[in-house]
Amino acid sequence: MFKSAQPEKASSNKEKSKENLFLSLLLNVGIPIFALSKLSSILGPTPALLLALLGPTLYAIYDYMKRHQINPISMLGFMGALIKGLFAYYHLDGFWFAVQEAAIPASLGVYTILSAIMGKPLVTYFVYNESVFNLPKLEQRLADNGAQAEFSRLLWQLTLLFGASFFFAGGMNFVLARKIIVSPAGTEAFNLELAKMTGLSYGVIAVPKMILTALSLWWFIHHLKKLTGLSLDELFHEKS
């Protein structure tokens, strides 16, 4: 049964640091693609792969040091890099890389749903938090309207939508990886295929997932306006 939970309050009045999107794309996408596609013939397949996996690892460390909180996506990116390194070291075939590519987003989908059941919905990290919404005004209006139960159901439905988007990404990752990664690990051909997979996954998978997420957020805000009677300007966090 879903347990509603208030979003965690910041320990200080400072607004939480936002994720550096440019640096995220550079270290998680740009450097891996460059290292795998351009440096494999120069450094050798294994050193180039290790350099590519270093990007997501460095970003996970940087993000934690800067924001002093665990970013689930960064941590899963780090785990994905570690697993890829182990798979390559043991020269596993493409099927296991496809499983890994599917398991990372699918795990986040499972965690998204379980976190809501345990009373600490992950959607409060992504969406329903004080850096996005004007929580005092919003929660006061929910209380005034006696709409807390309806809001809990709405948050649970948003959780399911977010979870579904991660499962979609996992399934698409598996299909894409099975079609692209066909060469043995530890070869230059394998590195080129992994670079192609990394690039295509953002165009073929990440963009549709972003659209699904945006539609989910629009649906959430639309219903939130109905529950509270607040306008868009009143719903969102007031910048100082």
Image (cartoon, rainbow, N blue to C red):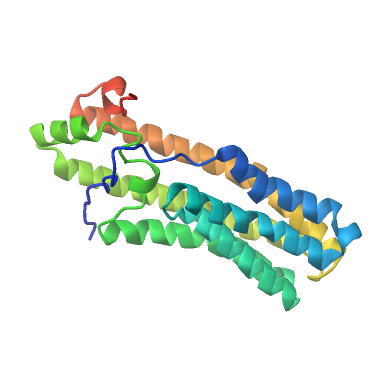
Task: Give the farthest residue toward the bottom.
Answer: 90
Q: Is residue 171 left or right of residue 194?
A: left
Considering only vertical position in the picture, is 5 above or below 222? below
Residue sitting nearer the eye, 192 or 45: 45
Looking at the picture, does residue 71 appear above or below residue 44?
above
- The spot of residue 224 in percent (x, y) is 26, 33
Image side of residue 155 versus residue 41, left or right: left
Q: Residue at x 85, y 67 (%)?
A: 187
Q: Could you tell whether 61 is left or right of 118 in the image?
A: right
Point out the image quarter for the C terminus: top left
Residue 188 in the image: state x and y as whole percent: 86, 63
Q: Is residue 147 above or below residue 53?
A: above
**Is there any visible trace of residue 92 in the rendered image?**
no
> Residue at left 81%, top 71%?
184
Could you say which quadrant of the image residue 145 lies in? top left
Percent x, y of residue 8: 27, 49
Q: Nearer the viewer, residue 126 or 100?
A: 126
Number of numbered labels in the structure image: 0
Give residue 141's position: percent from left, percent from top: 15, 31
Name which residue lies at 80% across and 65% down.
47
Can the viewer see residue 44 in this picture? yes
Q: Quadrant of residue 143?
A: top left
Quadrant containing the N terminus is bottom left
Whether residue 104 is situated above or below residue 208 in the rendered picture: below
The picture quadrant where one finds residue 49 is bottom right
